[in-house]
Image: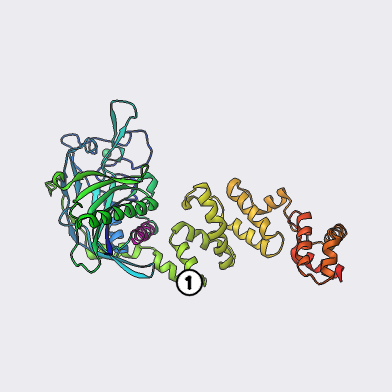
Amino acid sequence: MSFETIIGLEIHAELNTKSKIFCGCSTEFASEPNANTCPVCLAYPGTLPVLNERVVDLAVKAGLALNCKINHVSKFDRKNYFYPDLPKAYQISQFDLPICTDGAVEFECAGRHVRVRINRIHIEEDAGKLVHMEDEPYTLVDYNRAGIPLIEIVTEPDMRSPLEAVTFLRILKSILEYGEISDCRMEQGSLRCDANISIRPVGQKEFNTKVELKNINSFRELQKALEKEEKRQVELYRFDEGHKIVQETRRWDSAKGRTISMRTKEEAQDYRYFPDSDLVPVVIDEPAVAEIKNSLPELPMEKYRRFTEEYKLSADDADILTGDRYLSEFFEDTVREGAAPKAAANWVLGDMLRMLNESGIPSREIPVEPIRLCRLISMVEAGKISNTAGKEVFKEMFTSGGTPEEIVEKKGLAQISSEDALLEMVKKVIEENPKSVSDYRNGKTKAMGYLVGQVMKASRGRANPAMVNELLMKELG
Ligand SMILES: [Zn+2]
């Protein structure tokens, strides 16, 4: 029996605001514990929330970027539960009237056209953070995160493989980054993902019991967690037609590489939602929505189209570049400085990406100036340095800074194009390699490659290879 996998995602994104959602406290990451708190976000009795207007603008912006319907009236509700990181013992969220509904994102993945419908986007506040002390019998709590504005984006179960889920999340992240809606720093928890997954025999219409996976904070882990869970469910299904699959929440343990049951349906929370009486409904009229729509920047799909048309980039190159806002901006700045698009794309997607991956530096912190890459490209194209030397210069620019000219000078990488200097080297190599010389004269053309290589080696890679070739031919008749 073959199976089909059904995946839906719930994504929490912290919004790009300077202050919290219902008070004036700072949203800065990594501040001193509990420094960014006040009576409102600590839930002192008698305090009242005041909605941060920018939160509404950003949520609407997200809705428009994800092709949603913007609801002109939405309201806040209390989601009640007891947990030490939640000072009010309820979270202010949106229940039955969220701000955005009915969106969609479309993309191609492994030959399938995928349309992921967005069920809803709602606004809510984040909770604080428990800090479990290792080897100590207590836990600390940091309320800096309590009251940081979030949007929760809920998709329909429209993804059919872990790869489709990861691709969707990548696209969503780039849309939120392009729109400056969230900084999406997954390593800091400002973009978090929960996944619902179930399987069914191919051909079956109705859905089977789903399992919710929590605590996933990277693309790689989303893929791994979904693959593991998919396999676990298929095995259970083969064993007794899936009766053992219970609706439950499982936590992804990245260290152990497996999912662990947290709670089953029987223990599932009842949040007793009811409208928050401290906040009036959010009313946003059409002109306000139109104004936000006008403020939307070019989004990844449009940029992709423009890059293939304007710069004649290949589909793959344009896809990787525009999938990352910062890479695409760096590429375009380099072209604006005068670099040829194809050459700029090759450097950015080759040496630059490799260095970013090796160093772990995120693309938003590229340590090279576009103008410097542009100058490096023109030095290579003009034959002032070899391609190999160019790569060495780039590495140095990336790791320790400096202009390409300084690095070429310091490392003595300038290409040798003086005929006298090259001729001297060529003569020496001919003298030292009588065997290859006679091989060449006897028709073994391969020997030429060896001799060119010897001259390049003698020049420490700096000789102009075209000139070396020419001079060798001349000398050997
Ligand atoms: Zn506060």
**In the figure, is residue 324 to the left or right of 196?**
right
Residue 195 image point, x, y percent: 28, 53
Residue most extreme to the front: 239
Residue 250: x percent and y percent?
A: 25, 47
Residue drawn at the location 38% of the way across and 38% of the way down: 30
Amino acid on which the number 1 mark rests in the picture? Thr
Q: Nearer the viewer, residue 297 or 152?
A: 152
| Residue 196 in sight | no
Please identify the quarter of the rendering in which residue 472 is found: bottom right
Q: What span is colored magenta in the figure?
A: 162-176
Q: Does 169 appear in magenta?
A: yes
* Front residue of 264 and 53: 264
Q: Is residue 103 placed above or below 219 in the rendered structure?
A: below
Give the percent coordinates (x, y) of residue 325. Answer: 44, 59
Q: Is residue 449 magenta?
A: no
Residue 71 screen position, x and y as percent: 20, 62
Describe residue 323's horizontal placement relative to residue 98 as left or right. Answer: right
Question: Does the Cβ of the disc 1 residue fall within 8 Å of ligand 1?
Answer: no
Tell me the residue at 27%/59% (across/down): 7
Main SS of the magenta part reads helix
Q: Quadrant of residue 373?
A: bottom right
At x 40% / y 69%, what residue is drawn?
A: 302
Name the residue that disc number 1 marks.
Answer: 308
Of 4 and 99, nearer the camera is: 4
Quadrant (top left/top right/bottom left/bottom right) for the N terminus: bottom left
> Where in the image, quadrant-wise, is ligand 1 located?
top left
SS under mark 1: helix
